Image: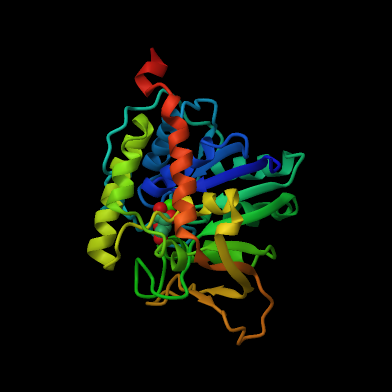
Amino acid sequence: MPKQIPLILDCDPGIDDFIAILMILAAPERFNLLGISVSGGNVPVKYTALNALKACELAGRRDVKVYAGCPGPMLRPLELQDEVHGETGLKGYDLPAPSMTLESKHGVDFLIDTILASSEKVTLATTGPVTNVAVAIVREPRILDNIEEIVTMGGSMALGNITPAAEYNFYADPDAAHILYTCGKKITTVSIDITHTAVTSLEWLDHIETLGHVGKVVSALIRPIHEWDVANFDTEGGAIHDPCVIGYLLDPTLFKGQDVHVEINTAFDVGRGRSIVDWWHKRSLPANTHYFNEINSKGFYELLTGLISRFQNLPKINEVRS
Ligand code: RIB
Ligand code: CA
């Protein structure tokens, strides 16, 4: 059995972030989740915080600590993705208000304090705009010495998904993404180049709907993503981007890529947030990321299905409450 990973997730739940949280909590033998920080992103931070709490409660893990961080980008107004995720971020299923409450500490303070205090190097997974992480790095660069790996969902070397040039997380806060890719650590990048090749199918959605209460919730949440992507990106199904980060942490053999240099466009123009991926090493700049260009989609969905099915013996939230 691989060693348990001391993990922090920084996210903006949002539907796919929500599924990523469930994946982590479905595998406690693999992850020691030190906490979750959220930022504004898909929806305002009041909802991303609430949705992170809802995910933990649905998973029967009221012990998990959730911290609200930066409400928006460092230098630009927040642009939401509520068309895709719904006004409150979980279009598709109306979960009950959580009984869990947020921690009072700010998400950036949580990142700095927890990483500095950890006796083991921490793995940091990000699945939203990276504002919290960038501010933490600027405020306390020493955290970089106690980070094992930063795995980030973001970027594209092909088409963008929020503009022709950029993927949403890097578009939302390009200045934060620039800080991340110039911090000196080699970032593991899970971009939409691969997440758009690992899409859902209606058969899979119907199957997981039969996997207990959590399976029913997950299926209902992902269906709007499936419909949106088929309609807007002419794909066969929906890209569930953030779960691919957790899939990598659980089984890196499902992913292929190479070390390359990436530069983030921070201009205030149509190229805002573009990840300029030097795949053919034309710029002879040192690699600052391990960038994936292939995912074993079949293996990823087998892994995800297995994790969702683990919740089948869990009592429904109201049963847990009573
Ligand atoms: O571009 C995909 C990313 O933007 C995902 O993290 C999704 O949750 C949205 O935040
Ligand atoms: Ca996200």
Along the viewing direction, whichever of 37 and 254 lies nearer the viewer: 254
Residue 319 image point, x, y percent: 37, 17
Q: Is residue 191 above or below residue 68?
A: below
Q: Is residue 254 left or right of residue 213?
A: right
Residue at the location (62% across, 71% down)? Answer: 258
Q: Is residue 261 above or below residue 124?
A: below
Q: Is residue 79 above or below residue 45?
A: below
Residue at the location (36% across, 46% down)? Answer: 15
Residue 115 image point, x, y percent: 68, 44
Residue at the location (31% across, 31% down)? Answer: 95
Along the viewing direction, whichever of 234 and 181 lies nearer the viewer: 234
Question: The C terminus appears in which quarter of the rendering?
Answer: top left
Q: Is residue 128 visible?
A: no
Residue 313 image point, x, y percent: 44, 24
The quarter of the displayed image where residue 54 is located: top left
Q: Is residue 108 left or right of residue 86?
A: right
Q: Is residue 318 visible?
A: yes
Residue at the location (66% across, 41% down)? Answer: 6
Along the viewing direction, whichever of 231 and 78 lies nearer the viewer: 231
Q: Is residue 107 above or below residue 255?
A: above
The quarter of the displayed image where residue 197 is located: bottom left
Question: The N terminus appears in which quarter of the rendering?
Answer: top right
